[in-house]
Image (cartoon, grey):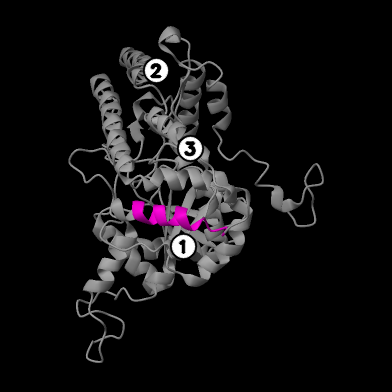
Amino acid sequence: MPASEVLPGHLAPRASRAVKPALSYIQAFLDGQKRPWSLQDSDEGSIVMTMAENKLCNDMLQERILKLQGCPQDVLCYDDFTGKQRLREAMAQLLEDTFMKGISVSPSHLAVLTGCGAVIDNLVFCISSPGDGILIPAPYYPAFDNDLEIRCQAVPVGFTLDESLDIALQLDTAAAASKAAGHPVAALLLTNPNNPLGTIYLDATIVSCLRWCCANTVHMISDEIYGSTVFDLDTAPCVVSAEVVARREQQQQPTPTPTTPQEGVAPTGRPCLGPEVEDLLHIVWGLSKDFGASGLRVGCLHSRNALLLKAFGNLSYFAGVSGHTQHLVATLLSDRAWVMGFLEANRERMRDAYRGLTEALDVAGIPHLRAVGAMFCWVDLREALPSPDWDGEAVLWRELVEQQHLVITPGNVCHAAEPGYFRICWSWVDPAALPVAVARISKVLEAQRTICSGQQGLRQTL
């Protein structure tokens, strides 16, 4: 929209993205909550599985919060807008106990804002300019588009990242294409564990990404909001944070010397991970997923970039967490025994729920990607598409919503490579609803199979 034009209501042009829905399927989500599924309304009640929230341990968290008493007077007053010292100390300890185990986390490297969306928005505001590209391996979290565009006017650039191939070459190719389109790359954004796939990146992939970012002076944002949400029995209970990987690489790689064939390159021929990584690597985490507490609006940035943290000291004034919530969360996280017990109970409940879903999918013959973390199942419904294109996917999605009262996330909004894949957020509903949801998908599949079979029979008779 030209800068000279104004929106209805006399809004400025820069509000044009804000007046659009953050997510294309948000209305279906809201409508589905008007008559939610229950054991008493199992036929017509809506099963909503498009919200990336975890309700499986809400009862435990609520019970613990109700036991917390006392409210110091200082919660009524201004404080450090990057977070109260006590809260940042408790968060630093939690990170050291979980996915940053093995390193020392300084509270001075943390900034607390109202959710990870606010963290990413302010982070991208500081590290990019309007029109800059943000590389994101696709498929990716649908709301990243809104988060990056709405205020910062950054450009999400989805690309395929195959971990079995040369990572640096793939990043080079994606960055070159983005630059050619007029969007020089400012950052690489990874989510680990992945949304919507529920997979975890290999440590070697993280190392390659870090080296590429350092070599190209590109910021790396590691969204680790699901860092402690790993439920697979054969996998460690947490991911290994990119911050841990970075410090390990800094320690292990030799310092370049005059005898090194190429300055800044280790004897192995791989670029050194030097001190610049401290300015370029940023970790995002919050309470929304690991603790199922998205309503508390608590997100956290970890960065060793001193100037960035100084900027956050100013910007966080506009996204500060309330003093009362900070006190509550600090008290909650300071009980390390309770926290570790809660995280383990959460893993067990998620493991059971995921098993219930995938067993039903297997019985129904519905292909799906094996997940080990987060709260997603990436299912392949290409067989049910009325036509093998994005229009066919939209038709199938509407049929699931309107006829089967099932709301799941279409792959198109996740920037899937091809039509027919859908994201199921299985921790938002009662586990008893999971086999019912699969049965509703199966009805649509069987109907499409019947149509295809009839069409094939007709062709054979002609």
Residue at horizontal 38 percent and vertical 56 percent from the top? 92
197, 316: nearer the viewer: 316
Q: What residue does disc 1 label? A: 187
* Occupied quadrant, residue 2: bottom right
| Relative vertical location of residue 55 with respect to residue 136 in this rendering, above or below | above
Q: Would residue 220 be counted in the magenta stretch?
A: no
Of the numbered discs 3 and 1, the one sitting upstream in the chain is 3
401, 94: nearer the viewer: 94
Residue 69 marker = 3
Neighbor class of circle 1 (other Cα within 10 Å; few <14, some 14-19, many 20+) is: many
What residue type is disc 1 on? Ala
330, 247: nearer the viewer: 330
Q: Nearer the viewer, mark 1 or mark 2?
A: 1
What residue type is disc 3 on? Gln
Of all residues, the one furthest to the right in this rendering is: 10
Q: Do callouts 1 and 2 mark residues in contact (Cβ within 8 Å)?
A: no
Residue at horizontal 32 percent and vertical 12 percent from the top? 461
| Relative vertical location of residue 291 with respect to residue 437 in this rendering, above or below | below
What's the distance in space between the residues labelled 2 and 3, CA to CA?
51 Å
Q: Which residues are magenta?
A: 80-94
What's the distance in space between the residues labelled 1 and 2, CA to CA?
41 Å
Name the spot of residue 375 as percent of width and height, x first.
36, 36
Q: What residue does disc 2 label? A: 444
Of all residues, the one furthest to the bottom in this rendering is: 258
* Occupied quadrant, residue 424: top left
Residue at horizontal 55 percent and vertical 38 percent from the top? 23
Whether residue 432 is visible, yes or no, is yes
- Indicate the quadrant containing the C terminus: top left, top right, bottom left or bottom right: top left
Name the spot of residue 166 as percent of width and height, x first.
27, 62
Label 3, secondary structure: give it: loop
Name the spot of residue 338 as percent of width and height, x first.
32, 40
Of the numbered discs 2 and 3, the one sitting upstream in the chain is 3
